Image: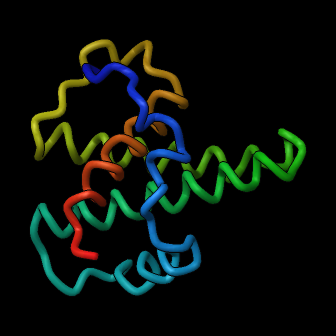
Amino acid sequence: MTNGSDATDNPTVAYAAAPGITSEIGWVIRHSIPRSSGTEYEREFLLRKAAAFDRMALAEAARCAPQAAAPTIESAVEAARQLMDHDVAHCGLSLRGAEIATADDCRAYVRREYHAWNRTQPL
């Protein structure tokens, strides 16, 4: 991955202006069957899904033993990788060095991208 870490890697910063997790999960469920097509729509779905999964994994890791939180964390990483695969194919993301990218790197990518996307959304 070519992006270095920055303040938006921090979940508190990345999700500061995000809607409530229940609202976001509802959005993901409602949009899991595409009503429209196109790269922009698909990316928004993958981004919001990855961010919702990341937020659930953060909450689970904060209140559960590591082995209990592991499946939720794995789901968050998989959702992050789906977003990254989409961005490689459609948005010009370069995964130079991907072989050394960690699960945390993938989730940090979601946080940076969500923060940037959320800043462009109307209030």
Examine the rendered structure and indicate whether residue 35 appears above or below residue 16: below
Quadrant (top left, top right, bottom left, bottom right) of the C terminus: bottom left
Residue 108's x, y, as percent? 45, 35
Examine the rendered structure and indicate whether residue 21 appears above or below residue 3: below
Q: Residue furthest right?
A: 65
110 or 81, nearer to the observer: 110
Residue sitting at 79 percent across and 47 percent down? 62
Residue 27's x, y, as percent? 42, 80
Residue sitting at 62 percent across and 44 percent down? 74
Quadrant (top left, top right, bottom left, bottom right) of the N terminus: top left
Residue sitting at 40 percent across and 86 percent down? 30
Residue 59's x, y, as percent? 71, 55
Snapshot colouring: rainbow
Left or right: where 80 falls relative to 56: left
Residue sitting at 85 percent across and 52 percent down? 63
Left or right: where 94 falls relative to 109: left
